Image (cartoon, grey):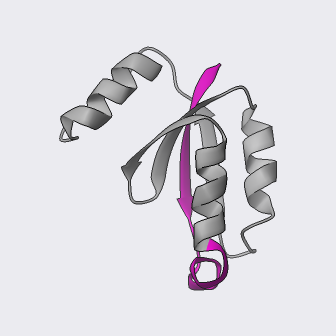
Amino acid sequence: MKTYLISFNLSSLTVLLNREKFFTTLKSFGYWAQINENVWLVKTNYSSLNIVTMLKTLYNYQDNVFVIEVTKDWSAFGFNPETVNWMKSMI
């Protein structure tokens, strides 16, 4: 399994129509942590392209989504201990 950072910006239309579906889909990828309002980490067997393709059905042309694999070399500041512990164990 790989860990990916998923960053997104959703338009008000997408938030209105598909917000819950979008978050349910993110959670369905595997282990997950929401580290900021629009930034999630997921540990999954899916590829970055698979993730974008699945999310693409839920957003419109005004939205954007960025997915990148996270490596062991990371650092963080200001997050709650639960999130940091998740990152330590999943990345």
Q: Quadrant of the N terminus?
A: top right
Q: Is residue 23 above or below residue 51?
A: below
Q: Quadrant of residue 50?
A: top right
Closer to the camera, 80 or 27? 27
Closer to the camera, 55 or 25? 25
Counting from the top left corner in percent of width and height, residue 79 is at: 23, 40
Q: Quadrant of residue 15?
A: bottom right
**Residue occupying the point 63% across, 62% down:** 22
Q: Is residue 47 above or below residue 14?
A: above
Q: Is residue 22 visible?
A: yes
Counting from the top left corner in percent of width and height, residue 69 is at: 60, 28
Q: Is residue 12 magenta?
A: yes
Counting from the top left corner in percent of width and height, residue 83 is at: 31, 36
Counting from the top left corner in percent of width and height, residue 16 is at: 59, 84
Q: Is residue 52 magenta?
A: no
In the image as oriented, which residue stretches furthest toward the top? Answer: 72
Q: Which residues are magenta?
A: 1-18
**Residue occupying the point 58% across, 71% down:** 19
**In the figure, is residue 12 to the left or right of 59?**
left
Q: How many marks?
A: 0
**Residue occupying the point 81% across, 50% down:** 53
**In the figure, is residue 47 to the left or right of 11?**
right
Q: Is residue 76 visible?
A: no
**Residue occupying the point 78% across, 60% down:** 56
Q: Is residue 2 above or below residue 27?
A: above
